Amino acid sequence: MSGFLAVLVVVLIFIVIFQIAKASEYVSILKGEKKAREQSNRINGFLLIAFLVLGLIGVYWCNDLLKGKILGESASEQGEGVDTLIYVTLAITGVVFVITQIALFWFAFKYQEKEGRKAFYFPHNNKLEVIWTVIPAIALTILVAFGLKHWFQLTSEAPKDAAVVEVTGKQFNWIFRYPGKDGALGRRDIKNIDPSAGNELGLDWNDPLNKDDFMPTELHLVVGKPVKFIIGSRDVIHDVGLPHFRMKMDAVPGIPTTLWFTPKFTTKQMKEKTGNPDFTFEISCDQMCGSGHYSMRGVIVVETQEEYDKWVASQKSTYSLTHADTAAPAAPAGEAKADSTQKAVAANIQ
Amino acid sequence: MSNEATLHSQQEVMHGAHDHHDHEHHHEDSFISKYVFSMDHKMIAKQFLITGIVWAIIGAFFSVLFRLQLGFPDATFPWLESILGHWAKGGRITAEAYYALVTMHGTILVFFVLTAGLSGTFSNLLIPLQVGARDMASPFMNCLSYWFFFLASLVMMASLFVQTGPASGGWTMYPPLSALGDASIGSKIGVDLWLTSMALFVVSQLLGGLNYISTLLNMRTKGMAMTKMPLTIWSFFFTAVLGVLSFPVLLSGFILLLMDRHAGTSFYLSDIFIAGKALANEGGSAILYQHLFWFLGHPEVYIIILPAMGMVSEVLAVSSRKPIFGYLAMIGSLFAICILAFLVWAHHMFVTGLNPFLGAFFVLLTLLIAVPSAIKVFNWITTIWKGNINFTPASLFSIGFVSTFISGGLTGIWLGNSSIDIHLHDTMFVIAHFHIVMGVSAFFGMFAGIYHWFPKMYGRFMNQTIGYIHFWVTMIGAYLIFWPMHYEGMAGMPRRYYDVSGWASFKQFGGLNEFITIVVILVFAVQLLFVFNFFYSIFKGRKLTTQNPWNATTLEWTTPIHAGHGNWPGEIPEVYRWAYDYSKDGRDFIPQTEPIGPNESAH
């Protein structure tokens, strides 16, 4: 009923607007085309200049209102470069924006049709055109140069001492794998995946490197220490989005990708910095991946080396969790039977 | 009734004067050959326009639906269940339906409205009229072009009604999501229908595009050198070239996708575990599709914006009574944009793991596009400088176009720089950027074109007052919707999120999302007002009393008010000068058909 009323009100407003518009057409004819045209030019000219002034105030006001809601300082060292580039670009494009919008609306207002005004025949002027080809070209060259400098830094090889974590996307969550004590990730194959046996990634249990790999539900990183993500997907394309660290990389099935960065603040420091006790570093999925895309959330905890070491010591290797019934080292691969532990792990990973 | 008489009193005289033309060119047209399978380019233009309008209403309505979900994620709207059924159980759109709506909104607006509805309409209407031809090079191909588009429309429309719903993987239709029915409900029959429809659409575009190119290259009237063509024609030319060269690549990408779906091939598939089992596909590259898609996808945005640029150039010159500033620079920049459009596609792929060295070239070429774009903006501004501007709805929309093109173009400089793109890629910032620059701008160009050439199409004017209301609400609304959206993107909020309330980093924008949704509804209502004005004016609008209502120089205004098939009743007029002799030598305007006088100054 209320829906029907709402539609009725809208239709009524439509009819009113339409009648007014129709009437104004008759009025303009009775009053004379010329007079009506002068009047509408005056009104629209005024509205254009009002739009410019209110618009520029609005831009300022909007910024005032929302600037506190966007991200603060970059939480990674590499992100600082991105932020600097954003500020430089903002400055250049901001100046161009203000100048061109003012010129556009001011000229429109100033040179509105007036009795007796003659338009100035001005078909071209080579000097002017060269000026506004060269100036943008120079500005853009500067931006390209700065941009590429940062781009090559951001996409460079990770330092040798960087920690390595594997991040794999699936519909609809992230799977993390740490290399364990040996510092190397074991082989895996999509054909070995067996969620019911707790093997979400298809780890090859014949590969000794896999024996100490562990798969937590949250990522833990050490503050100040570079970390390299090895990114993949086991179904569709996902994207590891790290807004606080200004990082992003697609997770593509069949084609591993990487990114690396150095966290600058611990989660605890961020909570203090932002004054938000619930602050969390989140991994968002930034590539449309299906109906659960919006809920594909991962959590990163950045902590000190001591806290990290303690956390690592508390982690059990995936192998030991999935092969709990067979004494670990001599276990023949692939014979693990589902037991309660595995189910717990599987449920945990799901 | 007396009012009607006042409105139409003047037209009787003129109508009498032109009556004999109608008889001269009288064809034995049946209803079918005149209105349905018409071969008259003017009628085909109207068919494209009206089909485009119908699609635009549907596509925009979808955006209202999903904005409701974004703005009010916890509210329920029982009426949604009555129109969407189980897709909105309990009055709340499901995630699957949300993604289907988002996908169809993109597909419909980008392809069916802003490609077919925009360049289809105005290329058809204006190319023969402004170059001085009786019709297209091949009227039959032109007719086919519309009917292939109509078929594509039917198939797309049908996909909305299948049980598993339409395609829902985003308008870019990236595999593997779109290749595997198990990955998403929309990737079942929905994607097959989507691909079929798009294949038909590509056929329509090629038939149309080849026709536009051959017409304007071969059928220009005597004296109409390429450098005397209005900028509209230049922009339609480059648009058609872009389409003809890039749509086939898209089609090839679609065929490979179709084979991956049904023929067991692995062009895009590798190492996939889905629905409890590992697929046998190996060695394919999901990224290959993105290269093929964006090789069209990027030129596509210029296919959308170039016709708008051309029409805005024309309307700004006519309404400020000044020649377009820097005519040759305008053509040069169109040409530069057209070439660069083919060389920047991978800037959509900076975060796919693309080789950074290769990425560097795409950064350079992408930012290079800003130079011709800047030239165009400065030239438009200089065109209105020291003019004598009459604010018709068309000229207001043209000014609005320049404003939104600046705003959206400048954020393109942010996104084209790969280092910034890493942070902003696939966030709401991108949504804000391309909606302003190719959504709102292109629509403004289209509105400018409709208001300006409506008298040519139907021999009547649209109601100006509604036009002004339409312009101001849309202009203010567009900025209110998309300007604050940049901030959501700066915070890293990803695009295509059904609900952000579960995220510590993004949930602070709840209030803003509500606000945006309310503005969206308002702006949508005003678009309906425009649609009403459009259809009402076809039948009841104020009648045209002169052939050339805007005092324009171009050839379309030398045809009779209701031009028959063939456009000019007698000889096609000869052209002696460029299209922009406004306010020259103290004369308000000099039509293109007037020979150069002995004492005339050169431009």
Image: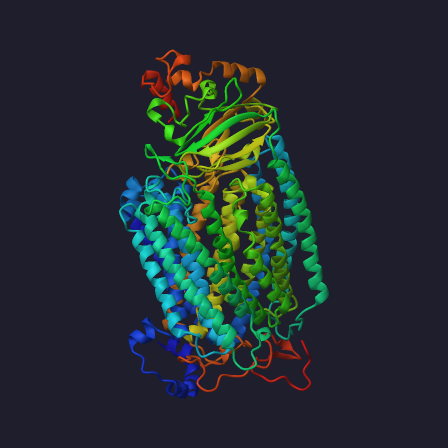
Can see residue A177? yes
Is A307 in front, or is B255? B255
Is A333 in front, or is A267? A333
Residue A226 rendering spot, x and y as whole percentages? 60, 26
Residue B185 rendering spot, x and y as whole percentages? 32, 42
- Above-or-below relation of B151 to A193: below
Q: Residue furthest right?
A: A127
Tell me the residue at 35%/19% (across/down): A342
The image quarter containing residue B576 is bottom right
Which scheme is used to colour this image of the protein? Answer: rainbow
Left or right, A145 with reference to A242 = right
Is A6 in front, or is A243? A243
Tell me the residue at 64%/48% (across/down): A94
Tell me the residue at 58%/38% (across/down): A67
Left or right, B19 with reference to B413 = left
Can see residue A17? no
Left or right, A202 with reference to A249 = left
Residue B306 rendering spot, x and y as whole percentages? 53, 62
Tell me the residue at 52%/80% (across/down): B221
Q: Quadrant of the C terminus of chain A?
A: top left
Q: Residue furthest top?
A: A327
Q: How many marks?
A: 0
The image quarter containing residue A84 is top right
Is B133 in front, or is B582? B133
- Above-or-below relation of B43 to B445: below
Residue B487 rendering spot, x and y as whole percentages? 54, 42
- Above-or-below relation of B192 to B380: above
